[in-house]
Image (cartoon, grey):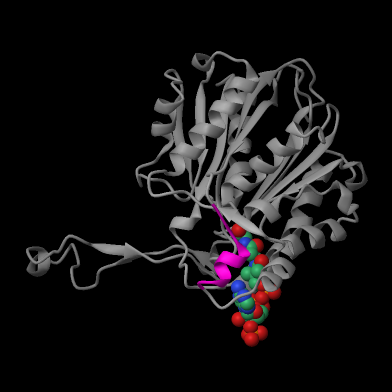
Amino acid sequence: MQSLTQPSTHIISTGSAVPDHHIDNYQLKAIIDTSNNWISTRTGISKRHVISSEESVIHLAANASEQAIQNSMIDRHSIDLILLATSTPNDLFGSASQLQALVKAKRAAAFDITAACSGFVIGLAIADQFIRSGTYNTVLVVGADVLSQWVDWSDRTTCILFGDGAGAAVVQSSTRNKQSGILGFELNTRGLECNQLSIKYIPNENYPLGNSRHFNKMGDRNGHYTTLQMNGREVYKFAVSEVPQSILRCLSKASISPKHIDWLILHQANQRILEAVASKLEISYEKVISNIKFYGNTSAASIPIALNEAFANGYICNGDIIVIAGFGAGLTWGSMVIRWDILC
Ligand code: UT7
C-alpha cells in the first residue's frame, strides 16, 4: 500500500540502439552446421545485429540514452543517477562512468548492474526504490549487452541466439497520479543453478598468485574467461515454469488480474518461450510484444528495445497495463507491472 506522501515512479521516455551490421540465418549456415529452418522454427530468430571491432557496449548504451534523454526533453544535468545493466562491460570495474561522461550528465552518480537478462527489470526496481525514498528525482536506466563478443561462433547451440543492442528509459518521480507508473515488482534468484548459463573466469592453475615460488614466473595472463556456456533445455524449462508464476505474484501484489494486462513484454529469448508464458497466463498472443525475429536475444537490452519500439510505433497508450519480465543467468528472474502514463 502506498503512502499518500510517497512519490511514484514514471517512465517518461525511452530510446534504443542496435549496431548497423547484422548477420542473418543464411550467413550462419555458411559457418556452422545449422539451417534457417531450424533457427526460425526453434527460436523465431531471423537475424541478429553485431558490433564492429571499433564499437563497444558503451557506444550502443550512449546512443540509446541520448535518444531517451532527447525524447524526455529534460535537462541532462537534472539526471541524478545512471544505472547501466550490462554483463558485457568494456571495463570490469564498471562501464557506467564512461556512459555518464559520454552523455554529459555531470551531476549523475553512475554504476553498473550485473544481472544478465534480468538486468533492466532490476535496474527499474532499483530506480523505483531511490525515487520512492525521495533520494533521487530523475534516473536513467539502461540495458545494454554485446554478447557477440562472448559467444563461441563455432558453437551452434548458442551463437545463433544472441545479438547486440541497448535500450534506455528516463524515469522520474511524480506525485501527479499515484495509481500509475511502476505499480510493483518482484525479483528472484536461484544461485544453486548458476552453472546453467555462465561466462566463467578460470584462474591459471600454473600461476597461483599466493604462491611466491611461482610469482616470478607469472606470464601476462593470470587466467581467462570462458565463452558463454548454456544448458538451453534447462534454461528453457526454468523460464516457462517460473516466469508465469512470478508475473502472477507481481500482479496479485498490485491487485491486478492477468486479464487486465494490455501488453506483455518478456525478455526476448525464444519465440516459443513468449508463446508458452502467454498461454500459461491465458493472455491472447496479440498482447505479446515480440521483435526477436530482428534482433535475437540481446540480453539486458531486449526488454527496453521492445518497450521503446512498442511505444514509438503507437502500440502502447496512456492507461495501458504493461507487464515486463526478465529471466536468465544467475539464475535470476523478475517481473514488474506498470500503468503507462507518459506526458505527451
Ligand atoms: O537469455 C537467457 C535465457 N535463455 C533462454 O531462455 C534460452 C532457453 N533455451 C532455448 O531457447 C532452447 O533450449 C534452444 C533454442 C537453446 C535450443 O532449442 P531446443 O528445442 O531446446 O533444442 P535442443 O537443445 O533440445 O536440441 C535439439 C536438437 C539437438 O540434436 P539431437 O541431439 O536431437 O540430435 C541439437 O544438437 O537440435 C540440435 N541443434 C541444432 N540443430 C541445428 C542445436 N542447435 C542447433 C542449430 N542448428 N543451431
The answer to which image quadrant residue 316 occupies is: top right
Give the residue displayed 55% in from the left and 73% down from the top. 156
Q: Is residue 140 left or right of residue 35?
A: left
Question: 186 or 25, which is in the foreground?
Answer: 25
Residues in magenta, as a range: 22-31
Q: Which x, y percent locates residue 237?
A: 70, 69
Quadrant where the N terminus is found in the figure: top right
The answer to which image quadrant residue 65 occupies is: top right
Q: Is residue 17 above or below residue 153?
A: above
Image quarter for ligand 1 equals bottom right
Q: Which x, y percent locates residue 19?
A: 53, 44
Q: Is residue 100 above or below residue 242?
A: above
Q: Which x, y percent locates residue 207?
A: 18, 68
Q: Is residue 15 left or right of residue 104?
A: right
Give the residue displayed 46% in from the left and 21% down from the top. 105
Tell me if residue 23 is in the magenta stretch. yes
Tell me if residue 246 is in the magenta stretch. no
Give the residue displayed 50% in from the left and 29% down from the top. 82
Q: Which x, y percent locates residue 181?
A: 75, 28
